[in-house]
Amino acid sequence: MKEPGCALCDAPGGRVVVQAPRWRVIHAEEAGFPAFYRVVWQDHVREYSQLPTAERHACMDVVTTVEECLLRHLAPAKVNLATLGNVVPHLHWHVIARFDWDSHFPGPVWAAPQRTVDKERLAGVAARLPALEQELLSLLPRSA
Amino acid sequence: MKEPGCALCDAPGGRVVVQAPRWRVIHAEEAGFPAFYRVVWQDHVREYSQLPTAERHACMDVVTTVEECLLRHLAPAKVNLATLGNVVPHLHWHVIARFDWDSHFPGPVWAAPQRTVDKERLAGVAARLPALEQELLSLLPRSA
């Protein structure tokens, strides 16, 4: 179920926070967005709708748990969810905590930046990630 | 369950293709993206994870049916799914057919454009929407 040459078949794609046979959660290390996670489906699947229903729901249950942890630990202005895959067509969901002070808010993270960001605020979010990730580890079913 | 002043509580937000008590599918009429649909939750819900599990799954089942119709009728290079809501924090999913010739591909639709688009190709996609929407009407459970 691996695709030769696919970046998300060949490598984790970021720092692995927790993984199970069907999915992994990675921290994406995107500059300016300290709480940017991805839920990557382990098998090479191109489109979300190509998963069987039970797996689609299981995938979104993981996305939902990540979103809930972001809301609980970081109190962001909004959480953004997206699966695009135009460049790497291997099913992965972006789960991004957005703050009204971040470089692009309220624009999407892919739009033009609107301001420079206060490094102390970025560091303040980063400081909360260990506890957030500890809770993710406790909540996500690693056998799933 | 309406929020005063919310753009998606006060108006459909686009041409309604099909709706049910819990959700509606609208055609978004975004310039340059002829097959841009949105699944809007009828009640005012801010974050996807705030829906009860059964409703979350029902919502994604509608998103999935729209994606499947886009794939079947338009053979796009990719379908993009996203719920952002930074500007209008009322749960709505963007479901967008992307083509390798579209103005932004492979970038997100919110990034900078990469080329001008052939109007004949746009018209070719638009001509297929009536059949696609007829299938959506037949597949989506309007009582749901």
Image (cartoon, coloured by chain):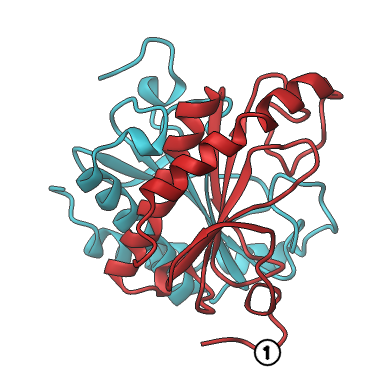
Chain colours: A red, B cyan
Residue type marked 1: Pro
- For disc 1, the marked residue is A4
Seen from the viewer's position, the closer of residues B18 and A28 is: A28
Residue farthest along the left direction in this orientation = B143
Above/below status of B46 relative to B22 = above
Estimate the x, y position of residue B62 in percent, counting from the top left: 31, 55
**What residue sits 72% from the left and 85% below the top?**
A5
Estimate the x, y position of residue B39 in percent, counting from the top left: 39, 45
Estimate the x, y position of residue A124 in percent, counting from the top left: 70, 23
**What residue sits 59% from the left and 38% below the top?**
A130
Image side of residue A105 versus residue A79, left or right:
right
Image side of residue B25 versus residue A39, left or right:
left
Image side of residue B48 versus residue A28, left or right:
left
Seen from the viewer's position, the closer of residues A121 and B8 is: A121
Chain of the residue on which disc 1 is drawn: A
Can you see residue A104?
yes
Seen from the viewer's position, the closer of residues A105 and A98 is: A98
SS of the residue at dot 1?
Answer: loop
* Viewport quadrant of the N terminus of chain B: top left
Image side of residue B44 versus residue B35, left or right:
left
Above/below status of B43 relative to A1 = above
**What residue sits 78% from the left and 60% below the top?**
B117
Can you see residue B14?
no
Seen from the viewer's position, the closer of residues B38 and A81 is: A81
Above/below status of A101 relative to A143 = above
Q: Quadrant of residue B139?
A: bottom left
Estimate the x, y position of residue B97 in percent, counting from the top left: 56, 62
Q: Quadrant of residue A12?
A: bottom right
